[in-house]
Amino acid sequence: MAKVGKKYQESSKLVDRNTLYTAGEALDLAVKTSKAKFDETIELAVRLGVDPRHADQQVRGAVVLPHGTGKTVKVLVFAKGDKAKEAEAAGAEYVGAEELAQKIQSQNWFDFDVVVATPDMMGVVGRLGRILGPKGLMPNPKSGTVTFDVAKAISEIKAGKVEYRVDKTAIIHVPVGKASFGVEKLSENLRALMEAIIKAKPAALKGQYIKSISISSTMGPGVKINPVKALD
């Protein structure tokens, strides 16, 4: 059995694993159990009743968190001409075309957090699917990262836009913010996320949509949230 640190053991004592907390109570505990020397990220995990193997039960989207993520995000934009100039003016860290694709392929270069592409560049970006896809970096129209309005996309990303996507185990993992935000700001971010996820319920799903919800700090224990009180 893997050993856990003293801080984790102390934090675990504050959480009743058999209790389903309200969102506010869970966030309060997540902040209290954040005991690392760095500003821990508060992360949300939502288990859905979908079958990700079916295309009509995929859950994916993006939402701008009211208070951002607390993380400085580096944006790479695939664009040419005026759209490249627009991306640079909007604050993108990296802007280019084939040369950036080549750099990613040949140098295994990933000094960026989000990729945006104009639709006419998807022929180039598509060749990077096997590299960007597994890392969750592939641009997608549903998340607003394939667009000609690159300035808006960059602005939203810098403001705290996060993408959520169900994985092959039917779980969505997404950051809510930093422990230093405090419960009030984290609550507003969590509400925005949960409202977006609930709205994204596939029409093809017949059974229960939200199976379970938990929240945790980077180094802390999971705190279960009552799905019925996820917006409380």
Image (spheres, helix red, strand yellow):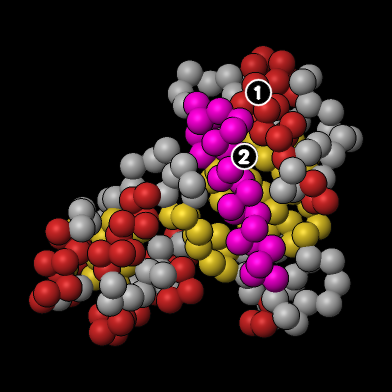
- Residue 186's x, y, as percent? 57, 37
Tell me the crowding category of disc 1: few under 14, some 14 to 19, or many 20 or more residues within 10 angstroms, Cα based: many
Q: Which residue is mark 1?
A: 33
Q: Is residue 83 left or right of residue 16?
A: left
Comes first in the chain, label 1 or label 2: 1
Task: Tell me the SS state at disc 1.
Answer: loop
Is residue 36 something one can see in this rendering?
yes
Q: Which residues are magenta?
A: 177-201
Frontmost of labels 1 and 2 is 2
Q: Residue at x 63, y 49 (%)?
A: 191
- Three-letter amino acid code of the residue under disc 2: Ser
Contact (Cβ within 8 Å) of mark 1 with mark 2:
no
Task: Tell me the SS state at disc 2.
Answer: helix
Is residue 124 something one can see in this rendering?
no
- Residue 9 versus residue 174: which sits nearer the camera? 174
- Up-down relation of residue 18 to residue 60 (above or below): above
Residue 216 lies in the magenta stretch: no
Q: Residue at x 30, y 59 (%)?
A: 154
Q: Which residue is mark 2?
A: 187
- Residue 96's x, y, as percent? 16, 68
Q: Is residue 12 left or right of residue 149?
A: right
